[in-house]
Every structure is written in structure tokens, then in C-alpha cells.
Image (cartoon, rainbow, N blue to C red):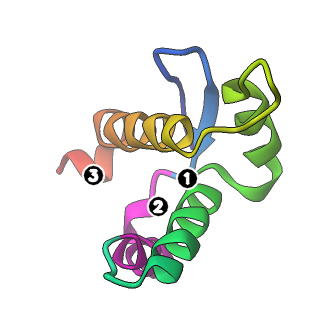
Amino acid sequence: MIRGKTSTGFKFAVNENIANDFRFIQAFRKTKSKNADDQLVGTYDLVELVIGSANMENLFKHVEDKDGTVSTEKIMNELTEILKIIPEKSKPLKN
């Protein structure tokens, strides 16, 4: 497991083999689709796959605005940062 913390303070634990999981590639591909529905599904699947369904609520609370909304942009910023941290800490991905 790769453990880390984003610049905003979100603590995460990610399987170091996540990039080798075909579901990761499938979800990432959907985020790049021309179909808006596929993009939404892919984005959700990607976040859930990377941080795990049990940690989703923690992420939501971490980025929640004062009015109670959870910004998609903030979620994606956290995910992007996590995806940048993973290769730095993963021996298999470094190679």
C-alpha cells in the first residue's frame, strides 16, 4: 500500500499496483470519452477505484464547501495529485 497526503491534507492509501489494474485503464478511458455520460461514470469509477469506496465519504467531507456542496473540480484536483504521488512512492511504477 502506498500511503500519502495531498497538499490540502487529505490522507490516502492506494494499492501500489493500481496502474496495472485493467479497471483503472477502463475508467480512465471513459473520462476521455466524447460522451458526457461516459465521462461522468468514468470519473466516479476512477475516484472510487483509486481511493476505495470506503474512503469516498472522507474525501467528500475533506473538499466540502461551507454550503455543503462537493465540488467536482476539487475532487479531481485531489485525484490528480494522488495520481502524481503514486509513481513517486511505488517501486514497480518507478521502474
Pointers 1 and 3 in contact (C-beta within 8 Å): no
The three-letter amino acid code for the residue at tag 1 is: Asn
Pointers 2 and 1 in contact (C-beta within 8 Å): yes
Callout 2 secondary element: helix
Q: Name the residue: 62% across, 23% down.
A: 10
The image shows residue 57 at horizontal and vertical percentages of: 82, 42
In the picture provided, is 67 more to the left or to the right than 31? right
| Residue located beneath label 1 in the image | 15
In this view, the residue in front, 51 or 61, is 61
In this view, the residue in front, 47 or 91, is 47
- State which tag comes first along the sequence, 1 or 3: 1
In the picture provided, is 22 more to the left or to the right than 51? left
| Residue located beneath label 3 in the image | 93
Give neighbour class at mark 2: few <14, some 14-19, many 20+ (Cα, 10 Å). some
Judged by its main secondary structure, the magenta piece is helix
The image shows residue 4 at horizontal and vertical percentages of: 53, 26
Callout 1 secondary element: loop
Real-space Cα distance between discs 1 and 3? Answer: 12 Å
In this view, the residue in front, 24 or 14, is 24
| Residue located beneath label 2 in the image | 18
The three-letter amino acid code for the residue at tag 3 is: Leu
The three-letter amino acid code for the residue at tag 2 is: Ile
User: Magenta segment: does it hold 94?
Assistant: no
Q: Name the residue: 21% across, 45% down.
A: 94
